[in-house]
Amino acid sequence: MFRKLVCRLIRPAGYPQAVARFSSVQETYPDEASKASQQYFNTPMIVERKLEFPTKDGRSRRAWVENIDSVEERKVGMIDLHPEIFAVQPRIDMIWENARWQMNYRKVNLVQVNSRAEMRGGGRKPWQQKGLGKARHGSIRSPIWYNGGSAHGPRAPTTKFYMLPMHTRLFGLKSMLSIKLAQDDLHIVNSLDIPTNDPTYLLDLAEERLWGPSVLFIDDTDLAPENFAVAADSIPHMTIMPVYGLNVFSMLKHDTLVLTLAAVERIEKQMLFFMNRADRAKFGRKFLTSQV
């Protein structure tokens, strides 16, 4: 039963009739045979690739590869995705740690109060040291005086930067990629080449494929195709980003994530390398903020 269901999903409609027609036409008319093959056998191919650091059971997640050179959606193939990156149990706490880290490390506090040395006046001793029965003071700008300087006030610039451990950053990325794939908000395209630089083309493309209001495009390089860069430049809710800039906060902000095939290869290669490196503990030690 399962085999019949899989064959029905993969094979196009009229598959047996196509086989019979193709075999009969092939013997008599070679040109007609090629046309029949293009008509009935133009189905996406499942191309398996050798995954680096494969799982013990050998299983993987598969996703469709779509085209982007036309508004109408067309499946051009399938790709194997590593389950340790695109099929992990998401951790909301890890996602929140990454989002809070990204929101805080860009903030710089510019509030500053004057110390006793920066206050105006108070250059002389308010009264003599002895003889008056008063407490000893050297300046009216002492922190214990009214309108005196501040002893431990904020000093600008004060940054909120801190470094997350490597495993927290990796698990945040894996959680977001897995969530996007599970919610059908992750789409893989063969490339970012589009036939025109008209922004309307990208808007029609997103509307036709139900991509959501905001879309994040990820490629393996920071040099996008000219037509795509010009078309996306005037659309504020569509962002192009190189693969080395992929982060949790940007994936949270955008409804749909679109990856190229080259970006998928680069993401898996880099993340699997850091997940399986022998000196992972030693490598993450230099990012600790508690060290002297």
Image (cartoon, rainbow, N blue to C red):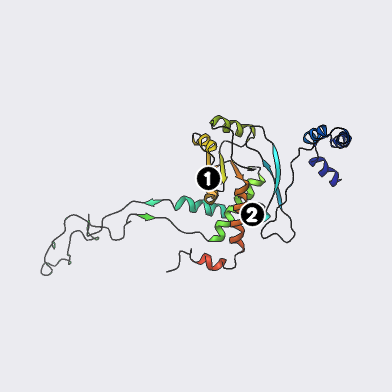
Q: Which residue corresponds to mark 2?
A: 85
Residue 227 position in % (x across, y down) = 54, 35
- Which residue is pictured at 52% across the width and 50% down the height? 245
Check disc 1 and report its element: helix, strand or loop.
strand
Amino acid type shown at disc 1: Met
Instruction: Tell me, yes or no, if residue 141 can be seen here.
Output: yes
Give the quadrant of residue 120. Answer: bottom left
Of 76 and 82, nearer the camera is 76
Amino acid type shown at disc 2: Ile
Instruction: Tell me, yes or no, if residue 91 can be seen here.
Output: no
Residue 270 position in % (x across, y down) = 58, 57
Check disc 2 and report its element: helix, strand or loop.
helix
The label number, if any, that marks residue 221 in the structure image: none
- Which residue is pictured at 38% across the width and 52% down the height? 108
Looking at marks 2 and 1 on the same chain, the residue that comes earlier in the sequence is marked by: 2
Of 89 and 59, nearer the camera is 59
- Which residue is pictured at 53% across the width and 66% down the height? 283
- Which residue is pictured at 71% across the width and 53% down the height? 60
Taking the image as shown, residue 158 lies to the left or right of residue 59, namely left
The label number, if any, that marks residue 241 in the structure image: 1
